[in-house]
Amino acid sequence: MQRPILLADDSEADRELALIAFERSGITNRVIAVADGKEALEFLNREGRWANRERVPPAFVMLDLKMPIVDGFAVLTAMQRSPFLRHIPVVVLTSSRREEDLVRAYNHGANAYVVKPIEFPEFERAIFDLGRMWGMLNVPPPALPV
C-alpha cells in the first residue's frame, strides 16, 4: 500500500501550489494538506477528525516551520518524543533562511531542510525532487501502530 504524504503549511497559496506540483509530477501518493501543526499532530496521532483514518503512517511529512497554533518546531519535538512517530521522515519546507532555524530544525529531528523557491517552476521542481526522493525512492521504516 502506498503511504500518503502529509503537507503542513499555514499558507493556503503554498499548499495549493504544492498540490498542483505534486499532481503535475506524476507522484501518485495521496497528499494530505493541513493548515497548522495542531492538525498535523492530530493526523499523525489519529485524533480529532483523523481518528478513523487508516493506521498507515505517512511516507514523509513536509513541514513549514512558521505556523499558528502549533509551529513546526513543536511538531518536530512531539514527533521525536513519540516512539510511533520518531522514525517518520520530515522535510522542512520553509521560507526561512535563518541559520538558527536550520540548526534548530535538524536538532529537533528534521531529515532535510529546503528553502521554498520563490518562482513556481523552481518550487515545482523542488516538490518533484522531494516527492520522488522521500515518497518513492526512500524505504520508510515499518509502520508501527499509532
Image: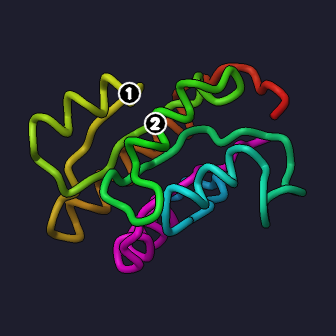
Q: Which residue is mark 1?
A: 108
Residue 87 placement (x, y as % from top left): 59, 22
The residue under the point 78% across, 54% down is 47
Q: Quick check: 12 left or right of 137?
A: left
Identify the disc placed on residue 126: none
Q: Are marks 2 and 1 in contact (CB under 8 Å)?
A: yes
Instruction: Tell me if 116 is positioned left or right of 110 in this view.
Output: left
Segment colored magenta:
1-25
Residue 128 placement (x, y as % from top left): 39, 52
Q: Earlier in the sequence, mark 2 or mark 1?
A: 2
Q: Give how far across and how far down residue 57 sits, in percent.
A: 72, 39
What is the spatial separation of the Cα atoms under label 2 and label 1, in whole angstroms? 6 Å
Front position in the image: 67 or 69: 69
The residue singled out by tag 2 in the image is 76
Badge 2 local density, few (<14 within 10 Å), some, or many (20+)? many
Q: Is residue 22 magenta?
A: yes
Quadrant position of residue 15: bottom left
Direction right: furthest residue? 52
Residue type (three-letter) at the residue carrying disc 1: His
The answer to whether 146 is drawn above or below residue 109 in the figure is: below
Q: Nearer the viewer, residue 25 or 7?
A: 7
Q: Residue shown at 35%/71% (left/top)?
A: 14
Q: Residue at x 40, y 53 (%)?
A: 71
Q: Kindly state the secondary structure of the residue where label 2 is placed.
A: helix
Report the side of 143 relative to 70 (left or right).
right
* Front position in the image: 136 or 74: 74
- Among the 4 quarters of the image, the one containing residue 118: bottom left
